[in-house]
Amino acid sequence: MGRLAERAVDNHKNWYTCSGAVLCAFAEEAGMTQAEAQKLSAPFAGGRQGKCGAVLAAERVLEQKYAPEQAAAMIERLEKAFAAKNRSVICRELRGGGLRTCRGCVQDSAEILESMLSENR
């Protein structure tokens, strides 16, 4: 596991929401402060938007970092990789269906994101 993915997991262990854990770990990559990342991540937590909050946070990093067309292609790759590993990107299916814990989703989305970012340096 990479440094940023480890930070995301540590954030979650320290009571960050799933989305906050990921977005705050990658805040610098996304060009934002910790406070901005925390505020921006709030609406994604707990599957409030249907999709896993950790995935939504990773997508936000890509949207902040790359031009719209490149970000859209990367988001599609991220979702496919996450779904291949977990069979879904939908929070209620992941948690309610017993496919993956929140911390597992944080780790998976952060690892995928970190890998994608390192490919594009």
Image (cartoon, rainbow, N blue to C red):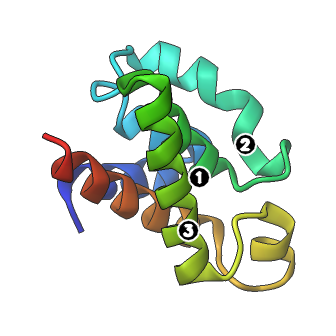
Disc number placed over residue 45 in the picture, else none: 2
- The residue lying toward the viewer, choosing from 14 and 79, is 79
> Which marked residue is nearer to the observer: mark 3 or mark 1?
3
Label 1 packing within 10 angstroms: few (<14), some (14-19), many (20+) = many
Circle 3/circle 2 CB separation < 8 Å: no
Q: Which residue is mark 1?
A: 55
Q: Secondary structure at mark 1?
A: helix
Quadrant occupied by the C terminus: top left
- Alpha-carbon distance for marks 3 and 1? 11 Å
- The residue lying toward the viewer, choosing from 27 and 16, is 27
Q: Mark 3 or mark 2: which comes first in sequence? A: 2
Residue at 32% of width from left, 56% of height from top?
5
* Mark 2: amino acid: Ala
Disc number placed over residue 80 in the picture, else none: 3
Q: Secondary structure at mark 2?
A: helix
Question: On the rendered structure, is 11 left or right of 97?
Answer: left
Q: Image quarter for residue 2? A: bottom left
> Which marked residue is nearer to the observer: mark 2 or mark 1?
1
Residue 3 x/y as whole percent: 19, 53
Residue 119 visible here: yes
Quadrant occupied by the N terminus: bottom left
- The residue lying toward the viewer, choosing from 86 and 106, is 86
* Mark 3: amino acid: Lys
Question: On the rendered structure, is 25 left or right of 2?
Answer: right
